[in-house]
Amino acid sequence: MLRALPKDEPFVYFDTDTLITGDIASVPFNFDPPSASLRREGTLPDGLLDGSISCHYRLLPMLYAREHDHVVQVLKDVTAPNKLKKVLKTSDTPKRMIYQGRGHKVRALFDRDNLPKREQAIRNRIKSNGFWMR
């Protein structure tokens, strides 16, 4: 896909596990240094990508465990239309996490103001409670 882009033209790429949660046009993209939407310091402009504008959640259980209420609400809103719901329910992870309420059970396991420092500790708690899905 990258080969199809015009040579030397700036572009923005988001992984499929990125949820746009705000006005993407408000991001003052600077294409001189490379940037990343991976919770990296010194890139995201700070506070926008993986902040108020986008969320690179990687796995749905992790989204429910650590993201702000606004992110969970945006996910709920964008996955509500029946046309999309029919497609997402064909996969076990979104079906169980979003539509059958497991995501909210994961959310209840954590205090987002006092999350474990290491991601592995978050994953382990989700797994030990039987809610881990990829």
Image: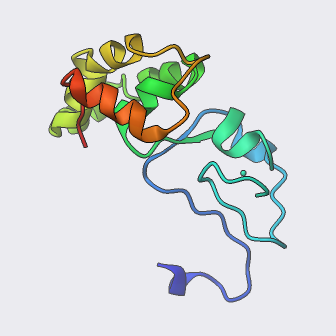
Q: Give percent across and percent down for residue 62.
A: 41, 34
Vertically, is 34 above or below 81?
Answer: below
Q: Quadrant of the C terminus?
A: top left
**Residue 131 visible in the snapshot:** no
Q: Give percent across and percent down for residue 84.
A: 31, 34
> Depth check: 87 or 54 in front?
54
Q: Residue at x 65, y 85 (%)?
A: 6
Q: Residue at x 63, y 48 (%)?
A: 39
Count of marks, rendered view: 0
Q: Give percent across and percent down for residue 100.
A: 21, 17
Vertically, is 20 above or below 14?
Answer: above
Q: Is residue 78 left or right of residue 80?
A: right
Quadrant in which residue 82 is drawn: top left
Q: Residue at x 18, y 24 (%)?
A: 130
Q: Residue at x 67, y 53 (%)?
A: 40
**Residue 30 visible in the snapshot:** yes
Q: Give percent across and percent down for residue 101.
A: 27, 14
Q: Is residue 28 left or right of residue 98?
A: right
> Depth check: 112 or 84 in front?
112
Render colour scheme: rainbow
Q: Is residue 1 left or right of residue 68?
A: left
